[in-house]
Amino acid sequence: MSKYRFNREQLRFVEEKLGLKGRLELVIRYVIGSLLLAVLYYIIFASIINTGQEERLLKENQMLSLEYRRALEKMDVLDSVLGDLRQRDKEIYMSIFKSSPPELLNEYNPRLYAQLDSSSDITLVSFASDRVRYMEYLAGELNRKFSAIFDTLKGRDDLNSIPSVMPIKGMTVSQTGASIGDKIHPFYKTMTRHTGIDLLAGLGTEVVATARGVVTEVSRSDRGRGNQITINHGGGYQTNYAHLGEVLVRNGQTVNRGTVIARVGSSGLSFAPHLHYEVRLNGNPMDPVNYFFAELTPSTYRDMMIIALNSGQSMD
């Protein structure tokens, strides 16, 4: 493109020839203008027309959004059903044991998961490392306690005479009833001292001796604690089994740990078929849950202890 300027002497416009520099500047301007125009066209084209991959991503995003909404609706329905089940379970538990059921499961904590999701890798690794060191410390403390127990029991030949198993084989945590302490009597509705633990079981379930010993008392009655068996294990230990059905041992008989001595019944003043089990040391009633250590895992022991302590009504 030619450039013109006004010549005052000639009183007319004359063409001004461009030099090399002017031509280069003109070319650069054209190139830059073309590039900017191309970028503008591309932006307009990309904002209006999607590529095949973008179309697939958009459809996938719409599908995921739809599934997410459906999942939220299903979760709301499940939460409602679980809430109804918890309320019904609480009402049933209250009607039988006159106390609130224990909370055995931890509630879902969305804040914790959100925190973990937003934390950096370094933070997560540091957190996990701290927890591992803490667990190693707890494991070391537990090993030291076990070592102390083994040192105390070392050399003793009467370990089989210490009650250390459950009197009903294969029972679950849900069969745990009230343990020792002041409990509501199922018939009189007054606070009475409960000296053992109630273990729920069906009629005819086998009852076993929890340690080696000698049967010192067998009584049959339709009152009080009904049919009972008392075993002396030596070392100050004594166990009692009450509300039995069929009695399978006699007075003065020697039994070993695991020997079937009776069957579960509902004799005497019993609210329902169950076994009332007692452990006494030097005549003092002990919490039987603490004498199930040969069969219970730590988590099972914890759950059983929670249920036993929170059961406000005994079965006898």
Image (spheres, rainbow, N blue to C red):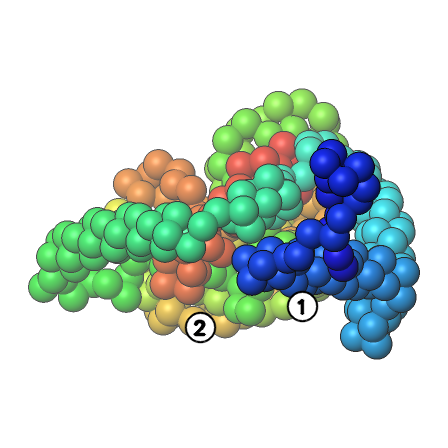
282 vs 225, left or right, is left
Residue 204's label in the rendered image is: 1
- Secondary structure at badge 2 equals loop
- Residue 87's place in the image compared with 213, above or below, is above
Q: Which residue is mark 2?
A: 259
Return the x and y of residue 301 as percentages of the image width and height.
45, 52
Residue 112's label in the rendered image is: none
Q: Give the residue furthest to the top.
A: 190
Type of residue at label 2?
Thr
Residue sitting nearer the eye, 146 or 75: 75
Residue at 73%, 62% (x, y): give it. Answer: 34
Residue at 50%, 31% (x, y): give it. Answer: 181
Return the x and y of residue 295 as percentages of the image width and height.
42, 64
Whether residue 265 appears in this view of the structure is no
Say which quarter of the image contains residue 298.
bottom left
Residue sitting nearer the eye, 203 or 181: 181
99 vs 293, left or right, is right
Say which quarter of the image contains residue 265.
bottom right
Residue sitting nearer the eye, 306 or 243: 306
Type of residue at label 1?
Gly
Residue at 72%, 27% (x, y): give it. Answer: 188
Residue at 60%, 39% (x, y): give it. Answer: 111
Say which quarter of the image contains residue 184.
top right
- Residue 202's place in the image compared with 10, above or below, is below
Whether residue 5 appears in this view of the structure is yes
Return the x and y of residue 173 as percentages of the image width and height.
58, 56
Marks 1 and 2, how far apart at CA: 15 Å
Image quadrant occupied by the C terminus = top right
254 vs 73, left or right, is left
